[in-house]
Image (cartoon, coloured by chain):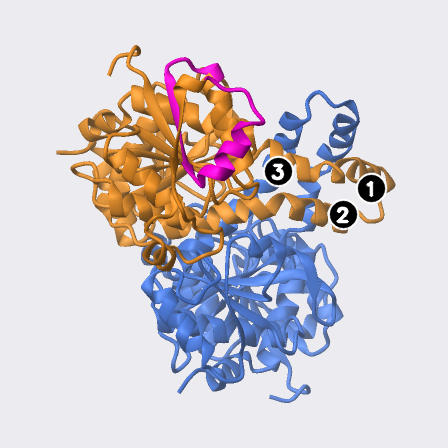
Chain colours: A orange, B blue
């Protein structure tokens, strides 16, 4: 696909924490910033039109497709999709499947997004299970843009992953880091309970053996939990159960560190002063380092790309997610994954 | 066992980061502080005698047992124990098995400690796999002593745990929290990738069902990663693979938060000042909140108690570990676990 051919990204405008307004605003902004990208807004037409009346956009690159229903944030995905097959996330996925769009972005219910992909898209040949990947903040930075973020996958799409699944996740994560993070030779690691290649459950030990002989991938072996925040690897691979637990732990830990510091030093005035200065800003640390703001979390493994933006996404984050989705489509991410998989 | 009968704790004096001196000092101090506890020092007699010549202790409550070898911190446990069966951790475990001591403390190689127990002690009837438990710092405090620590197990002894193993871990953790942390009705949770009872791999879902109907245990259901630092549960149960990854992640995260805060606020002078004040102390936050300093990490599931003190333990931490071991023996922790297990 050449640079010249425009790319269309479908936006599920329903289901985010801030309602349709921020998603519409973000997609509208994308049509102003990226001349080769078209937006297709999927959701309640009346709400979309109202939101569009408040913002600037390039009309010839923005279309609307009505969807009568949507999935709320805390609904059970399977039940919701069964009950309302015309919900916005499902309609958007079908538009992508049918070639009306090339990729999609949603800030809604993550499980519903994963399930809509599974029910609509095809797995890349050689991939048996999809993975939800996310960037997370690290102590070291990397790549052209000196990014202080690494990629971890899977963080929740595939709770039980086999050795072959883990190998596929490694390949998918490396391809994404190359294309999206512009990191030409990312260091890929398996998450385990020790750095030795024999450490971990059988599936991890077997995946280690397979990755050690896989060509075209810079596999640096096993890393431990401590290496996640450190940033030892550019891509950390694990099953969705472990990845999800780790990711959610990272979310809670910054406040806790401040609480602990307060406890540890309650008698020290100087430290207390430092903490007081910091504590007002701790919520903002979370915002600033919120990895999902940086283009969102891709669901990898399908022939079509889905970018899950954080539920709290404002317009800026949606615009970024749309840019990442367009970049992945233009760079033929799925094809890059397919050719990198072991025969 | 009545309060009057003295308890003997064997100390593996070799293998800690600070050598035999700190362990000997800690055990010596225990004989001064606890009239009902005897210490049995196991290791190189010449080194022990030299260390003893430097400290005060109650001679009639402190004995020495020579062991010619020891396991170093980074040796592979099985190979080391095979090559040197007379190493101090193995000799200490055998002394406990043979009734010369009632429990043991080691600051050495964790894997060698777990393996020495497995080769020497008996599993409690009804327990199929042992668990290494550890306390970790949380945002909320609990129990009589307003402890800002919770218990997590397993953190590395059993990499693959079945549903029944997880149930046994829950029972063991609750018994430990009741007896050692004096928390009469601890809230016990399963770690999963969602709070719903149906979330997680099959073994976790099955364990949830079994725990929900287990009498005498306050099971609060599944918790997520974010709940670990928050302290939502008093006892968090998981397999040794997930637990080890989480624990090691927690170890690395405090420095990373400071790094990230620095990155996020590099332009804000006030925050920088706060960070500068804090950063000198960040290493000490780790020390102060170092959960293993608070009595060490017990290996649970065997008829005899093994307390793994941190490799960096100084004398004070060793004394505390000895007190915890003695308390567990006096309170008949193993019997409490056995009677709480499901029929």
Q: Quadrant of residue A234?
A: top left
Instruction: Provide the chain ID for the residue under circle 1.
Output: A
Which label's residue is closer to the chain start, 2 or 3? 2
Image position of A76 (left or right of B250): left
Q: Residue at x 54, y 33 (%)?
A: A50
From the image, tell me which residue sits under label 2: A262
Of badges 2 and 3, nearer the viewer stands 3
Of badges 3 and 1, nearer the viewer stands 3
Instruction: Provide the chain ID for the residue under circle 2.
Output: A
Badge 3: few (under 14), some or many (20 or more) residues near its Cα, within 10 Å? some
In terms of depth relative to the viewer, which is nearer, A205 or A163? A163
* Percent coordinates x, y for residue A101 in the rendering: 30, 29
Residue A328 falls within the magenta-colored stretch: no
Q: Report, in whole angstroms, how far the alpha carbon at label 2 lies from the one at label 1.
A: 7 Å
From the image, tell me which residue sits under label 1: A272
Q: Residue at x 71, y 20 (%)?
A: B267
Circles 2 and 1, Cβ within 8 Å, touching? The answer is yes
* Percent coordinates x, y for residue A300 in the rendering: 31, 37
Disc number placed over residue A286 in the picture, else none:
3
Q: Report, in whole angstroms, how far the alpha carbon at label 2 lies from the one at label 3.
A: 19 Å
Do the residues marked 2 and 3 share a common chain? yes
In terms of depth relative to the viewer, which is nearer, A123 or B92? A123
Q: Which SS class for mark 2? A: helix
Q: Residue at x 40, y 74 (%)?
A: B209
Q: Which SS class for mark 3? A: helix
Which label's residue is closer to the chain start, 2 or 1? 2
């Amino acid at each position: 696909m050449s640079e010249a051919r425009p790319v269309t990204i479908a936006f599920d405008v329903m289901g985010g924490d801030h309602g349709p307004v921020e998603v519409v605003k973000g997609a509208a902004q994308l049509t102003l910033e990226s001349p080769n990208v078209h937006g297709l807004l999927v959701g309640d037409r009346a709400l979309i039109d109202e939101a569009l009346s408040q913002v600037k956009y390039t009309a010839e690159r923005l279309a609307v497709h009505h969807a009568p229903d949507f999935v709320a944030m805390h609904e059970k995905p399977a039940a919701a999709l069964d009950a309302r097959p015309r919900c916005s996330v499902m309609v958007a996925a079908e538009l992508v499947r049918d070639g009306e769009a090339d990729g999609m972005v949603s800030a809604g219910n993550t499980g519903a997004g994963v399930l809509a992909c599974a029910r609509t898209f095809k797995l890349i040949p050689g991939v048996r299970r999809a993975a939800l990947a996310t960037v997370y903040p690290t102590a070291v930075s990397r790549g052209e843009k000196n990014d202080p973020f690494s990629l971890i996958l899977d963080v929740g799409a595939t709770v039980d992953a086999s050795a072959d699944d883990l190998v596929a996740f490694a390949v998918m994560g490396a391809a994404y880091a190359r294309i999206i993070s512009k990191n030409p030779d990312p260091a890929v690691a398996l998450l385990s309970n020790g750095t030795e290649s024999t450490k971990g459950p059988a599936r991890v030990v077997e995946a280690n053996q397979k990755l050690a002989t896989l060509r075209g991938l810079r596999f640096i072996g096993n890393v431990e939990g401590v290496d996640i925040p450190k940033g030892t690897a550019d891509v950390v691979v694990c099953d969705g159960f472990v990845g999800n637990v780790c990711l959610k732990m990272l979310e809670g830990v910054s406040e806790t560190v401040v609480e602990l510091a307060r406890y540890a030093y309650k008698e020290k005035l100087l430290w207390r002063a430092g903490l007081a200065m910091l504590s007002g800003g701790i919520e903002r640390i979370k915002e600033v380092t919120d990895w999902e703001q940086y283009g969102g979390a891709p669901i990898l493994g399908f022939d079509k790309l889905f970018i899950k933006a954080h539920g709290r996404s404002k317009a800026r984050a949606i615009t970024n997610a749309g840019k990442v989705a367009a970049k992945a489509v233009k760079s033929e991410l799925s094809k890059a994954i397919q050719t990198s998989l072991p025969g």
